Image (tube, coloured by chain):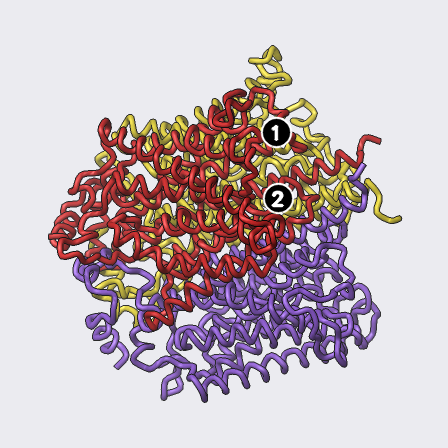
Chain colours: A purple, B yellow, C red
Amino acid sequence: METSVSSIAIGLDTVWVLLCAALVFFMEAGFAALEAGFIHSRNSLNIIMKVFMDCTVGIIGYFVLGFAIMYGVDKAGLIGFSGIGLSGDFSGIGLKIPLYAFWLFQAAFAIAMATIVSGAVAERMKFAPYIVFSFVATVIIYPIAGHWVWNSGGWLNQMGMLDFAGSAVVHSLGGWAALAAVLVLGPRNNRFLKDGSVTVMPGHNLPLAALGAFILWFGWFGFNPGSTLSGMDLNIAKIAVNTNLSAAAGGTMATLFTLAKFGKADPSMAINGVLGGLVAITASCAYVEPISSLLIGAVAGVFIVLAVPFFDSLRADDPVGAIAVHGVCGTFGTVAVGIFAEQGGLLYGGGFHLLGVQILGVAAISLWGFGSTYVVFSALKKTVGIRVTKEDEVLGLDLSEHGIASYNELEHSALGGYMQHLPLQRNPILVEKEDVTIA
Amino acid sequence: METSVSSIAIGLDTVWVLLCAALVFFMEAGFAALEAGFIHSRNSLNIIMKVFMDCTVGIIGYFVLGFAIMYGVDKAGLIGFSGIGLSGDFSGIGLKIPLYAFWLFQAAFAIAMATIVSGAVAERMKFAPYIVFSFVATVIIYPIAGHWVWNSGGWLNQMGMLDFAGSAVVHSLGGWAALAAVLVLGPRNNRFLKDGSVTVMPGHNLPLAALGAFILWFGWFGFNPGSTLSGMDLNIAKIAVNTNLSAAAGGTMATLFTLAKFGKADPSMAINGVLGGLVAITASCAYVEPISSLLIGAVAGVFIVLAVPFFDSLRADDPVGAIAVHGVCGTFGTVAVGIFAEQGGLLYGGGFHLLGVQILGVAAISLWGFGSTYVVFSALKKTVGIRVTKEDEVLGLDLSEHGIASYNELEHSALGGYMQHLPLQRNPILVEKEDVTIA
Amino acid sequence: METSVSSIAIGLDTVWVLLCAALVFFMEAGFAALEAGFIHSRNSLNIIMKVFMDCTVGIIGYFVLGFAIMYGVDKAGLIGFSGIGLSGDFSGIGLKIPLYAFWLFQAAFAIAMATIVSGAVAERMKFAPYIVFSFVATVIIYPIAGHWVWNSGGWLNQMGMLDFAGSAVVHSLGGWAALAAVLVLGPRNNRFLKDGSVTVMPGHNLPLAALGAFILWFGWFGFNPGSTLSGMDLNIAKIAVNTNLSAAAGGTMATLFTLAKFGKADPSMAINGVLGGLVAITASCAYVEPISSLLIGAVAGVFIVLAVPFFDSLRADDPVGAIAVHGVCGTFGTVAVGIFAEQGGLLYGGGFHLLGVQILGVAAISLWGFGSTYVVFSALKKTVGIRVTKEDEVLGLDLSEHGIASYNELEHSALGGYMQHLPLQRNPILVEKEDVTIA
């Protein structure tokens, strides 16, 4: 009889990881919808195309090189480099499942990190250099951070840093990379005015953004529980519950906080509150009690409401709140492991050791994300340029970079019948109209 | 060797239930899209925010208290109350999977029940009291109904009522609760005119509504088969097939019926026909033959086409058809068990006993849903108020309750360039325009 | 102890196939969103309704008759016919999982084939005859092609043709059927002008189309790996990786190719490049190395960019690019098995035998798809008619066929307040406006 107990166990784990990988991959649809909905319609197809590039160029980059750097044989705790194109010996990882399944799950994480940045640089970054960044992110930036924590030879792994599903490795890294990108790129036209005021630029399609948030939440059912890499690890149930409780607490707090503060419950804060709760629990979901998850999520929800205007005050223009959601909540979530972990957490008698390691670890990863992205963006800025012209920004990146708009009918408008039959090129009426508003 | 046969079996069941829980949770995205698409754009962000509250506040409510009432130690067949925050002894449930996995699956059901009501009260209910209702629904209304049927000590469970995945416990309960809510709340402005005519208020974005329906259908692959709580129960295959056949028959009948009656196939009826088929088969999917599923779905599809105008004639204003889909088809589906069940159904020689129990059970649950919601809505009406002002209803709940519109660009319109730069507050032009149309 | 090793293995395989079936079924949401987004808004609800019909009428057709023709006892290698309504003896299939699970997975494939055609005939085909076609496709056209390749008695199966998940059986068949349908139906009004020029008709909602593409990609995680019918077949991991690498390569090449050729990265080409990569790898995903997947996807991406204008030059009007994606890439992908298969492929020393079989097989299936659809469409054309009137095409099929528009509010426009309160019938202003633009 060929069906052995161990072969079924491997099959179960493989099924689990592949289905979770599908869920994590589907988060790219969530990012695309969220980011497109949160920005102007004239740039929304461009941002979706950038997310598409993460899923295409980024996937290839992580296959050819990124994985080798992340999970290849360790050099000095800092970097790996063996097994280009999955061709090497990765027995060091100690996998029970096929390498391909592990790679696919990891690849979905790698592109998520790149995509975090795409939202922050929306509405003014050129398309071609974004492709370069996406490739560099999945080939170098993310794999090195991942190596430090998740490769058994990585220096943070050796120190005992705990980041179960990537509050630091994916989210802090991506969030602080986004800050660097935004600082090099500069804010959108008219965003920060000379009199010190900030122009509110509400999303053009908030139902689409909310649908994106739901898809992201759905994907997190794979992101966190799937990180066990085993369906036989019954901890997957607690991980899923912790993940959802933190999301729920984050959304609740952001909603109630804005309701109390402004008299109105703010939808984009509620959405980002949920996402902040999800990001924050990602490091600790396997290590904490549900009650701690509620607390972690609630704090994340408050952080979101405070952090979004804070980055505005720094004139760091982040159209979708990626720095607050991923940078702030990812950092907080990584630190929270040191406080709430049932094994080693401060509140559970573990003292300050784990807490210190977590702080050091997330600081190192955040600095790496910020610094490396600052260098890459600066280099791109000085060579090919990273920013569209002011005219193109007014026109919209959909037309300037792709020659087509997101919504190619204006039949809802009085101008519809006419506009619909103009050639697909820079539309003089649109430009003129926009110029008036921007002047 | 640590991998035992039983540990793999538990792992498989846990993986199955968690992935099905993810699918059921994702139905909230479906509800949000469906409801938003079926109503005016000026209220669509508000309805999405209400669904968000079910997913946040509702999840917390069901965690802290609701589950204890539903699955805690039974008192007199009516209510449980032990194990707040999942802290108690739930060995009485007889679970093979981790309690956390079971809770997550159940939580997704609990919030679905609350969300059913959200659609019916769309376009005029205030946001804050909806949060209160969502909490009460997941803490008291749903858990008590669930206790009666799914807690082994519940009085309907003791009588032998069969409701496999909740045609009664989730859908009838939610549907008739929606009717009560609508009656207390009253219809939308201008919906029912003095001359007896009914103003048709078509959805602002039917592709979004259809996408929501597809997501709901997708989620039902978890809702019904997942209710086995075991991937080793091979009945999951027949359950999935029955579910899809009923949905297909419901959609087919609603489409052909409207095509024959009006000369045009009505999209919202087709959508609700599919959903009616899904709701109706939910009680019986594990107990009937595929041919019965086709019949149950077909009847549900016809019921939808008849029930929507019927509730209009009662002046019960239900913008999305929730009462027809969940109330009518949920009730019919529960009764259908007594007719079509291969074990005990009337057509299979089982006599009238099971049929009687099903009728009694669904009547009790429907009355509980209607009565408890009537009381809660009446109490809220007399205290904090449940209805927005007429001015806010004209303006739209997106702006009045959340200070932001769903679609914050009018660049498709001649007014676009101007409107886009107005502050995010009550927009005098919009208000004026709307006032004109409503006068 | 009732839990045996073999019962767990069956449970695992059943869970795997059902969840993959759910993913494949969800692709219908992807098709609906993709097709709706790629066409004019005035026809987008109609196309969604047609996809709905595949999911309802098509599912019933495949249940009652289609499956019996595909997997019933073979007659002469050409057709099966036993087991109407799954009632027969299907032990010949040699399934380890329940027949119901296998049927559901297959049913999701059957309706996908029908849906491929729906996109190509968008914007001018009447609704009622489409229902007839959908039924014929799932009852006869698809089952016969499937019988040839996937029924062990089928003549192409006997010859050793390899089509792992249906590049030929689903995609070539559907793509060339779409070409036949388009040729019988004729192009949209004003699409091909007398002076030889082609009117570009960009999609009305490209973010919706992109979301559809992401959903399709997500669904392919079930489409290809699920075709093992077993979660214990560890090849599922490589299959999933190959699938994603090909999609990534297709999207990358289509993007870079258009960027190089036109100076702008074309979004619809990028989207169709990804889909072309997915279609092309579908036949070979279980048989090739990852490096081959990258190559196959890259070629598919180039084919897309070349094929779309090619079919325009033939005056075959395909609004969504279905013929290029499914016909061209499906055919290429089937042939690619004969080149890249590790067992028997030309590049692996297998000689020309397998390649010849693949070419013969995909030619036969393509001809069957083209020919049978040509006959069905011609018969429908001569009897009930397949094309809406010119007036209805100008008005839009949403209003003419369903009496309601996709977007029933014009509050974004200067006309909004007025339009919103017109009765749901042919709207004179809209008609007039459209007439002006078309004249």
Q: Is residue C413 above or below residue C360?
A: below
Q: Position of residue C253 (x, y in %)?
A: 44, 64
Identified by mark 1, the residue type is Ile
Question: Quick one: SS at disc 2?
Answer: helix
Mark 2 and mark 1 on one chain = no
The residue sitting at 76% across, 73% down in the picture is A157
| Front in this rendered view, residue B124 or C193 | C193
Q: Which residue is mark 2?
A: B20
- Tag on residue C93? 1
| Front in this rendered view, residue B157 or C248 | C248
In the image, is B240 to the left or to the right of A350?
A: left
Q: State which quadrant residue C258 falls in.
A: bottom left
Q: Alpha-carbon distance for marks 2 and 1?
A: 28 Å
Q: Position of residue B124 (x, y in %)?
A: 38, 49
Q: Chain of mark 1?
A: C
Residue A231 visible? The answer is yes
